[in-house]
Image: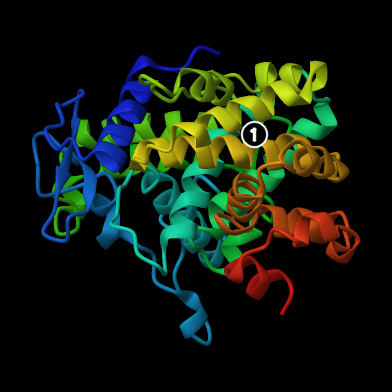
Amino acid sequence: MEIQPRIQLFIYEYFKIKFKQEIQPAPWGAFQYRFDEDNCAELSFVGEPEESFTSWMYDLQPRDAHYVASPDWQPALAERFHQMDVYDELILYYLLFTINSTLTIRPTNAYNAMNDRMKSYSFFQMSHCSAASRISEEQQHQLRDFFFFFYLYAHPVNEDTLYACSFREQRLVHTKSNISLEHYFSAFHDHYSEHCDQYRDDLIINPDDIQASKHLTLELLRILEGKSSPLLMPSEEGLEAVVELINNVDLMLQLYEDNPSALFEIMRDFLVEDHSTLYRDHCFTTLLQNYVCYILYFKFNEIHTLVDYFSSTPTWCGIIINKMFTDTIFIQRIMRLKQIDLSAYPDVIAHFGEEARSIYLS
């Protein structure tokens, strides 16, 4: 289950562009990052730089049957997938587009920053949770479903697409039709590469580029299905301890089980340095959300241990608590799933800032 080296290279490139503004990306096979006029970085085809990994299939989007009283057409792959109807076809197209846009880097603002953060984080963690041996298989599956929900929710997709898929062991399937996403996406690309001439008005790229897209899509899908090795974040000076725990969830869990203070000391050391960059802030946010998702998800009362540790430094405690509660809505959903009453945690509420109070106490 070794991850393809290329996808990890794309991940490193993604982090460099997104957080360090290094804008001289090198080509990797058929793809390279390219900026458009909206300052959006997309994986574009080396041979067709104006066409991207997400945009090449824009004109192949199925008609929306919801706007037709009695749809009188068949899905493009109806002969291969007899159980699929035109509504299923549109959902599968949306899923393919969502997966292909995973590595797209869009400018963030107050309205999209949280969704951007949650989709990226959830994708990254889906490569980790199935490999975390210090949690049970049942817990792995709970987290896998949790992260996949947010991966789609934060894209965002419509409600039909959000609930369209489920896991069969380590395979994602379209639940209604029981079609494997791997089989469908593979057949989708093969169909259009084999019938390129038939779709010449809708396709700019050639069959080789369509096949390159298929392989990259399937690599991304393998990550979502937990069939790859964990994705790694690049380290840098001063972030070694934080990144080591991010890249090895088992190490973080073991550290916490042996001595919770050891994990909190790493958080404290980060705050002591007080040197903010986009990437440093991202790494700290990721570590805190790992604490939320891998520890508080299963033992929410452990939050008292964190508050107690930072009781002598209320400013730092406030920074940590507010980031955990407002950088994402993961903890909000955990509390709903676990039916946790926040009023039972006055020591936590005491550190809430204005944003957290408006979300959780209004």
Closer to us: 315 or 56: 315
Relative to 133, 341 lies left or right: right
Q: Count the numbered circles shown.
A: 1
**Going 68% across and 25% down the picture, which residue do you hit?**
263
Q: Where residue 240 sits: x, y (%)?
A: 46, 18
Residue closest to the eye, 194 or 327: 327
Judge whether 82 appears above or below 246 on screen: below
Residue 112 visible to the viewer: yes
Tell me where residue 245 appears, x and y as whole percent.
Answer: 58, 22
Of the 4 image quadrants, the one containing the C terminus is: bottom right
- 127 relative to 281 in the view: left or right: right
| Scheme by which the image is coloured | rainbow
Task: Indicate the amino acid at tag 1.
Answer: Arg
Above or below 223: residue 153: below
The residue under label 1 is 171
**Rendering quarter of residue 239:** top left
- Residue 30: name its quadrant: top left
Q: Is residue 92 found left or right of 109 in the rendered image?
A: right
Q: Which corner quadrant of the image does residue 261 belong to?
A: top right
- What residue occupies the far top of the structure in this picture? 2
Work out whether residue 82 can be spotted: no
The residue drawn where x is 52% and y is 51% is 118
Q: Report x, y in % for residue 91.
A: 52, 60
Quarter of the image for the N terminus: give it: top right
**Is 182 on the left-hand or right-hand side of 22?**
right
